[in-house]
């Protein structure tokens, strides 16, 4: 091996060693700072102070929902609006395709992230269900509309095998606009 080759090999080895040392140092620094911050390490001046019993704070009552004046119990206000679907509908003249937009209501708790990840898959399963359902225009009116929404919720629950969703809404022109959080979720979960 030539002198230039040895020099390049030594330089690469030294750079790798320095990089590994930096990673170890940064890991220790971050871990130490994280532990101190996580456990609320007291300042040196606070160590000498006399300990007092912790004060119990009263929690504020939950804020009422903006509409109706009462908060929902057991339901989340977050929704994911899916992209529109072209759904075949039986008519006298054969088949027509109409645009259908759905909103998935999220279940309460920490379900936003997994529900968001599953939304495209649920969307596809619902589209497959709607194409096989042999729907007519009567299925979008009155009690049949509610049954269709319940059937679509069943599709969502069977697809995920989890309780990520608490309801399905068939969006109409008169449906209220989405809240900001739901708009953000809808744009991210596609």
Image: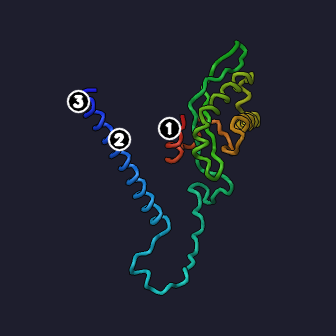
Q: Which residue is mark 3?
A: 4
Q: Which residue is mark 1?
A: 187
For residue 5, say whether it is visible.
Answer: yes
Residue 132 relative to residue 56: left or right: right
Which quadrant, please, contains the C terminus? top right
Mark 1 and mark 3: Cα distance apart in space: 55 Å
Residue 181 relative to residue 128: left or right: left
Query: Residue 112 at x, y = what percent?
Result: 58, 46
Query: Residue 66 at x, y = what percent?
Result: 56, 56
Q: Nearer the viewer, mark 1 or mark 3?
A: 3
Q: Earlier in the sequence, mark 1 or mark 2?
A: 2
Name the residue rendered at 25%, 27% in the picture.
2
Q: Nearer the viewer, mark 1 or mark 2?
A: 2
Q: Residues within 10 Å of mark 3 (few under 14, many from 20)?
A: few
Say if mark 1 contacts mark 3, CB within 8 Å. Answer: no
Name the residue rendered at 72%, 19% in the picture.
90
Name the residue rendered at 50%, 38% in the picture.
187
In this picture, is 182 found above or below 74? above
Q: Nearer the viewer, mark 2 or mark 3?
A: 3
40 or 121: nearer the eye? 40
Q: Earlier in the sequence, mark 1 or mark 3?
A: 3
Say if mark 2 contacts mark 3, CB within 8 Å. Answer: no
Q: Which residue is mark 2?
A: 16
In this picture, is 6 found above or below 179? above
Query: Residue 150 at x, y = what percent?
Result: 74, 38
């Amino acid at each position: 091996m030539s002198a230039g080759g040895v020099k390049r090999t030594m330089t690469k080895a030294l750079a790798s060693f320095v990089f590994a040392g930096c990673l170890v140092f940064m890991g220790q620094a971050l871990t130490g700072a994280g532990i101190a911050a996580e456990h609320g390490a007291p300042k040196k001046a606070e160590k000498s102070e006399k300990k007092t019993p912790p004060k119990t704070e009263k929690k504020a009552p939950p804020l009422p929902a903006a509409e109706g004046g009462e908060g929902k119990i057991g339901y989340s206000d977050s929704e994911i609006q899916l992209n529109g679907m072209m759904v075949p509908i039986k008519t006298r003249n054969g088949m027509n395709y109409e645009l259908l937009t759905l909103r998935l209501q999220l279940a309460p708790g920490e379900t936003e992230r997994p529900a968001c990840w599953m939304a495209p898959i649920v969307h596809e399963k619902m589209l497959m269900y709607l194409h096989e359902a042999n729907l007519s225009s009567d299925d979008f009116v009155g009690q049949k509309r509610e049954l269709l929404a319940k059937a679509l919720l069943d599709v969502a629950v069977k697809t995920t095998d989890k309780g990520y969703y608490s309801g399905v809404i068939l969006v109409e022109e008169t449906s209220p606009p989405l809240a900001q959080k739901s708009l953000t979720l809808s744009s991210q979960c596609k």
